[in-house]
């Protein structure tokens, strides 16, 4: 899997939502290898878009389509300032990779010591995590550049996620989370998508 993350300051969240709906309705049928998109705007106006493709080549072919270029020319006007693109060729899925049924999505961004260690911790802890946090529907961890990491976590609801965070952790879960946190070499930014826009091929 290949993931491209797009981030930028939204002028109007509603306009961006309409633009993405238009892409899904009109352009996605011709986007071979597109697996799905998770997007939304945070409370402070940051637009985050996590687009999943089968391969980097599939993503590139989509970007090269004339209709995609025209769509982006129009959509780029909906941002205040520059837009950042993060290309992630290494991707780890856990607990099934998430769900379009999620009602709350949290995107975490930071830098890690070693993507391979992140993969190992996530894969090793899936069974314990699933039993302890039924509110967590799954997620992905995607890596870019020199240790950049974007994790996208899908939850049944924000309330359930907050209640899950506050639960008393058994030793195995506490150790797993300690290992995970120690893999990050920078502060982690948390982007809460309280009204996520979730799409998959029809």
Image: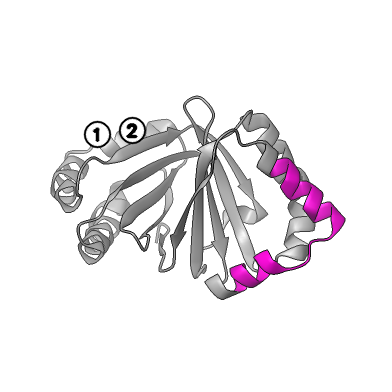
Residue 43 visible in the snapshot: yes
Give the quarter of the figure containing the C terminus.
bottom left
Residue 176, given in percent of the width and then of the height, sits at 77, 48
Q: Is residue 162 magenta?
A: yes
Front one among 141 and 27: 141
| 48 lies left or right of 138 | left
For label 2, the residue is 60
Q: Residue furthest top?
A: 146
Please rate how many residues cluster around mark 2, counting C-alpha atoms within 10 Å: few if below 14, some from 14 to 19, many from 20: few
Q: Main secondary structure of the magenta part?
A: helix
For label 1, the residue is 64
Residue 48, given in percent of the width and then of the height, sits at 37, 51
Residue 199: mark? none
Residue 100 visible in the snapshot: no
| 103 lies left or right of 82 | right
* Contact flag, marks 2 and 1 (Cβ < 8 Å): yes
Residue 134, given in percent of the width and then of the height, sits at 69, 68
At 79% across and 61% down in the image, what residue appears? 169
Front one among 67 and 117: 117
Please rate how many residues cluster around mark 1, counting C-alpha atoms within 10 Å: few if below 14, some from 14 to 19, many from 20: few
| 81 lies left or right of 39 | left
| 25 lies left or right of 125 | left
At 23% across and 64% down in the image, what residue appears? 18
How far is disc 2 from disc 1 in space, using C-alphas? 6 Å
At 47% across and 26% down in the image, what residue appears? 145
* Range shown magenta: 160-180
Query: In the image, is residue 12 above or below residue 141?
Result: below
Query: In the image, is residue 159 above or below residue 20?
Result: below
Q: Is the image coloured rainbow, by chain, by secondary structure, or in one colour?
A: one colour
């Amino acid at each position: 899997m290949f993931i491209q993350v797009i981030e930028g300051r939204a002028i109007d969240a509603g306009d961006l939502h309409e633009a993405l709906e238009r892409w899904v309705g009109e352009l996605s049928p011709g986007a071979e290898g597109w697996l799905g998109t998770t997007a939304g705007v945070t409370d402070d106006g940051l637009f985050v878009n996590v687009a999943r493709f089968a391969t980097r080549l599939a993503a590139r072919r989509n970007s090269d389509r004339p209709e995609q270029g025209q769509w982006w020319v129009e959509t780029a006007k909906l941002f205040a300032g520059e837009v950042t693109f993060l290309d992630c060729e290494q991707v780890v899925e856990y607990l099934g990779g998430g769900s379009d049924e999620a009602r709350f999505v949290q995107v975490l961004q930071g830098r890690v010591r070693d993507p391979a260690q992140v993969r190992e911790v996530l894969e090793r802890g899936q069974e314990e995590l699933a039993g302890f946090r039924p509110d967590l529907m799954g997620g992905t961890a995607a890596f870019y550049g020199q240790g950049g990491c974007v994790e996208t976590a899908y939850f049944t609801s924000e309330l359930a996620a907050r209640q899950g965070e506050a639960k008393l952790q058994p030793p195995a879960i506490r150790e797993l989370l300690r290992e995970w946190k120690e893999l990050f070499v920078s502060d982690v930014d948390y982007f809460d998508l309280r009204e996520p826009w979730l799409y998959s091929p029809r």
